[in-house]
Amino acid sequence: MRADTMEKPGKGTEGVLGWLSWSLLAVGILAVVVYAAVWEQPRALTRHGEVPAFELDDQEGAKVSRESLRGKVWVGTFMFTSCRNACPGMAAELLKIQKTIRNEDGLAGKLRLVSFSLDPERDTPLQLAQYSSQQGIDSGCWSFLRGGRGEMIRLCEQGFRMIAGGSQEAGVEPGVPHSDRFALVDKKGVIRGYYRPSSVPGDLEKLLDAARILIEENQQE
């Protein structure tokens, strides 16, 4: 028997296997591209209503209003200096945001922090100034505001839809629970999201990512 009569694999089989391999590779590449496009697509931020008009004094005695904040993205919180409940944790997260603002060119001058005192009777201008100094609050990017007690309660509960804690008559006691939510507000004064960085892991990063999206939208307009 001749040695070269042994059957060899046909070229047709090799062609089918090669075509199948290239097809699978192409499908894999396409899947990666589609996944990357979806992953990079910014999440749409919900609109929760417009912040009502206000004009209040900050820790340095300067006037801060909804109109003076127009054009900037800002984070609104409600707290008070003698609070022993949610406020210490909130202040710690706000200081982290302040540090990020200072260190990130894309946020510096474009993202602000605005805290509203729920206890303006005790949070006098002097008390707010002392608290700001003790905490290391930079008034260049973080305003701590005070006004009439009734106005602050209405702004918190009706304007931002947060729990203020305590009654308008009794005031806020140091241990009374109130909302620890952070409201992200866009350049037009519309609330675009709520976050709880002091109690929900990962919410600080989500808030900062959302703020970057809003700032980028501002630059594109």
Image (cartoon, grey):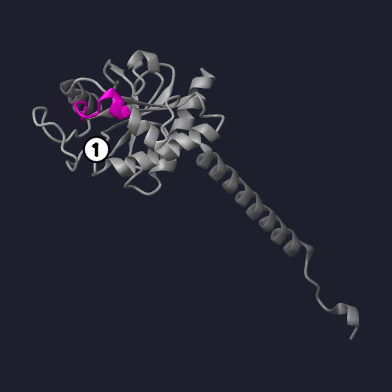
Screen quadrant of the N terminus: bottom right
**Quarter occupied by residue 54:** top left
Residue 68 x, y percent position in the rendering: 38, 14
Residue type marked 1: Ser
Other-residue count near label 1 (Cα within 10 Å), few / some / many at <14 / 14–19 / ≥20: some
Residue 202 x, y percent position in the rendering: 40, 47
Q: Which residue is mark 1?
A: 82
Residue 127 covered by magenta stretch: yes
Q: Secondary structure at mark 1?
A: loop
Relative to 178, is 187 on the left or the right? right
Who is closer to the viewer here, 37 or 195? 195
Q: Residue at x 55, y 33 (%)?
A: 104
**Position of 195 relative to 158 (above/below):** below
Relative to 178, is 202 on the left or the right? right
Residue 128 x, y percent position in the rendering: 31, 28
Which range is magenta?
Answer: 119-128
Q: Residue at x 56, y 43 (%)?
A: 36
Q: Main secondary structure of the magenta part?
A: loop
Who is closer to the viewer here, 56 or 155? 56
**Position of 107 relative to 53 (above/below):** below
Q: Residue at x 49, y 32 (%)?
A: 101
**Position of 59 relative to 182 (above/below):** above
Residue 68 covered by magenta stretch: no
